[in-house]
Amino acid sequence: MKKNLYLAVLSLFIALPVSHSAQAEKIYSVGVVPQFEARRINEIWQPILEEVSQQSGIKLELKASSSIPVFEKQLAAGEFDFAYMNPYHAIVSNEEQGYAPLLRDTGRSLYGVIVVKQDSPIQSVKELDGKIVAFPSPNALGAALLPRAELARKFNIEIEELYVKSHSSVYLNVLLDKAVAGGGVQKTLSQQPEKIRNQLRILHKTERLPPHPITAHPRVASSVQSRVSAAFIQMDNSETGKDLLKMIPMKKIGEASILDYESLKKLGLHEYYVAR
């Protein structure tokens, strides 16, 4: 009798639903294309994700990538729930994994730059023919894909490509004379320390495009996507939030869709894109 009573009580406890507080909180991973070194990426994004997590009630956690090629492999494998990526990544990842743009900077456009040292004798892009030019990675849109395409198509020159993993490394390699010129984007150039920025000169600006989006993998519930998007947009309503977004940098955050990036397909950049 006692044994039967014990089994009955035990089965009752097993059948009881687990309380919400006892359940493990769902954590959503966030990938960020590493335009800067890991420490800098963490400094920029950690406080942003903490603020969005607090406002949305959705726990977000930064998932690091050691380089842009590594980020691309993770993206191709669908490892991130949310990801901040370049516009061409948005096209490729949408086709491969179904990542959908949620948000982007609606206050500015993206364009690449080719820089040389301030005192460099080079005054025209044509003079880069046969020279070493540094890039962060082959598929960095504004910093490599567009510049490489334009150097070949518009200027009909050939260069020796040097890949150095990040935008910051590009600028340093130019200053250290490891490369005659380097590809970056205006926003990462503007974020360099003054002592570095002031020693560089923009030789060429590429075509303008819609900037990097924040995207979501289709496995993330639409309700979760909506809450995260709303929390990001809410940040634009306070000075503290605006200051945090400027670090990305995002001048004016707003909604985005894959249609914003359809024009990239017409550029024929697939010829220069290196599949991972």
Image (cartoon, rainbow, N blue to C red):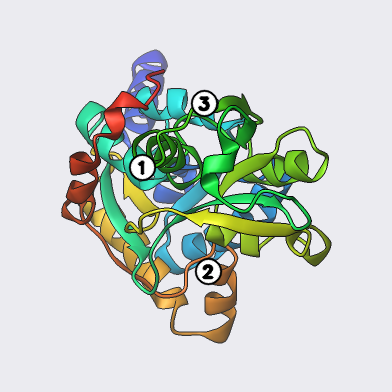
Q: Where is residue 228 in the image (x, y as percent from the top left)?
A: 36, 60
Q: What kind of element bears circle 2?
A: helix
Image depth: mark 3 or mark 1 in front: 1
Categorize mark 3 by other alpha carbons within 10 Å: few (<14), some (14-19), many (20+): many
Is residue 17 shown to the viewer in this render? no
In the shown orientation, is residue 112 left or right of residue 135?
left
Pick the front one: 61 or 102? 102
Going 37% across and 27% down the picture, which residue do you hit? Answer: 272
Disc 1 element: loop
Q: In which quarter of the image is the C terminus?
A: top left
Mark 2 or 3 closer to N-term?
3
Type of amino acid at the residue the image marks with label 3:
Pro
Is residue 176 or residue 77 the one in the foreground?
A: 176
User: Residue 196: percent from the left, percent from the top?
Assistant: 79, 57
Q: Name the residue under label 2.
A: 245
Quadrant hosting residue 8: top left
Disc marking residue 137: none
